[in-house]
């Protein structure tokens, strides 16, 4: 009679893993994991993914391999693949040291995919262990902004700034809410300028200010900031879109 609460299938999986540690397969798993991480650090994502997939094929519950696969796929913007591997960690019965980071990444990905319910679920889980986590609070602000719940988005960015009044990203994001909604464009520009004071070379913050002036129909100021932003980050799609919209206008 079992008294540990595990099903026969779970017991078999546990013993299989114990057996694995005593075989050459485990050495192969460790080797593949090491090689996969090294390849990722060298920037060879394709080979890194191939190697790490071999690792999880040999050891499907290897959380470290799933973690690196999730991060690499996220970097490549292959979000559906990333979700698969990161969820292996969230759903695992084993504890993983980077679980909170995994939930943060999942929350951000879900927000990008407009799956706001799952985004909030992951992020609120993070706040249970640290309700002042700036990254989590910022991603929640981003999530509510994309959901067009601007009041809650402002609330979370305000929370970030109450904890860290030098958080440039929070100032910029908060300012953009006022600019995009046209609720108070002058206030939005002023807040974005606080972000620029903290990081004077940021093309994103220059773009936000330029976009604010465009919304305000101040063409001279708009082109000055938008051009500076484009010169610093000519490959940014959002900056190019803002500049093009201004020029077409």
Image: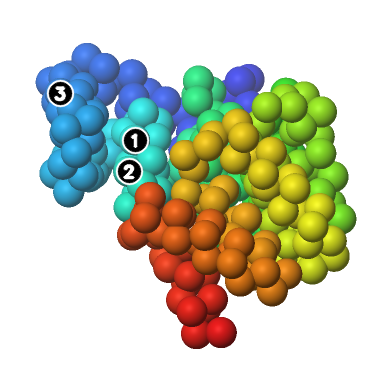
Query: Which structural element holds mark 2?
Result: helix
Image quarter of the C terminus: bottom right
The one of 193 and 104 positioned closer to us in this rendering: 193
Kindly tell me whether residue 77 is visible in this rendering. no
Q: In which quarter of the image is residue 115?
A: bottom right
Q: Residue at x 61, y 20 (%)?
A: 4
The residue beneath circle 2 is 72
163 lies above or below 89: above
Which sits earlier in the primary sequence, circle 3 or circle 2? 3
Label 3 Cα crowd, 10 Å radius (few <14 / some 14-19 / many 20+): few
Q: In this view, does 210 lie to the left or right of 145?
A: left
- Measured as percent of width and height from the top left, residue 221 is found at 61, 62
Camera-side mark, 3 or 1: 1
- Measured as percent of width and height from the top left, residue 140 is found at 71, 46
Q: Is residue 82 left or right of residue 110?
A: left
- Measured as percent of width and height from the top left, residue 138 is found at 67, 40
Label 2 Cα crowd, 10 Å radius (few <14 / some 14-19 / many 20+): many
Query: Which structural element holds mark 3?
Result: helix
The residue beneath circle 1 is 68
1 lies above or below 170: above
Kindly tell me whether residue 196 is visible in this rendering. yes
Q: Which residue is drawn at 52% across and 66% down?
A: 223
Q: Quadrant of residue 184?
A: bottom right
The one of 55 and 115 positioned closer to us in this rendering: 115
Q: Distance between the residues labelled 1 and 2?
A: 6 Å
Q: Distance between the residues labelled 3 and 2?
A: 19 Å
Image quarter of the N terminus: top right
The residue beneath circle 3 is 31
Q: Distance between the residues labelled 3 and 1?
A: 15 Å
């Amino acid at each position: 009679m079992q008294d540990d609460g595990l099903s026969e299938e779970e017991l078999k999986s546990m013993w299989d893993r114990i057996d694995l540690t005593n075989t050459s397969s485990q050495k192969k798993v460790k080797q593949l994991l090491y090689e996969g991480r090294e390849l990722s650090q060298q920037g060879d994502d394709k080979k890194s993914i191939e190697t790490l997939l071999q690792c999880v094929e040999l050891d499907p519950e290897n959380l470290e391999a799933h973690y690196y696969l999730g991060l690499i796929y996220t970097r490549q913007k292959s979000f559906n693949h990333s979700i698969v591997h990161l969820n292996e960690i969230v759903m695992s019965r084993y504890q993983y040291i980077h679980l909170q980071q995994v939930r943060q990444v999942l929350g951000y990905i879900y927000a990008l995919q407009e799956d706001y319910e799952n985004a909030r679920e992951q992020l609120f889980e993070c706040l249970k262990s640290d309700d002042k986590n700036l990254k989590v609070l910022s991603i929640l602000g981003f999530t509510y902004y994309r959901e067009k719940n601007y009041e809650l988005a402002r609330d979370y960015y305000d929370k970030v700034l109450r904890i860290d009044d030098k958080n440039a990203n929070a100032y910029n994001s908060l300012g953009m809410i006022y600019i995009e909604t046209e609720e108070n464009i002058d206030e939005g520009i002023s807040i974005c300028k606080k972000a620029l004071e903290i990081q004077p070379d940021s093309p994103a913050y220059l773009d936000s200010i330029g976009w604010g002036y465009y919304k305000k129909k101040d063409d001279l100021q708009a082109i000055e900031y938008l051009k500076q932003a484009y010169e610093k980050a000519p490959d940014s799609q959002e900056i190019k879109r803002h500049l093009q919209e201004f020029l077409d206008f």
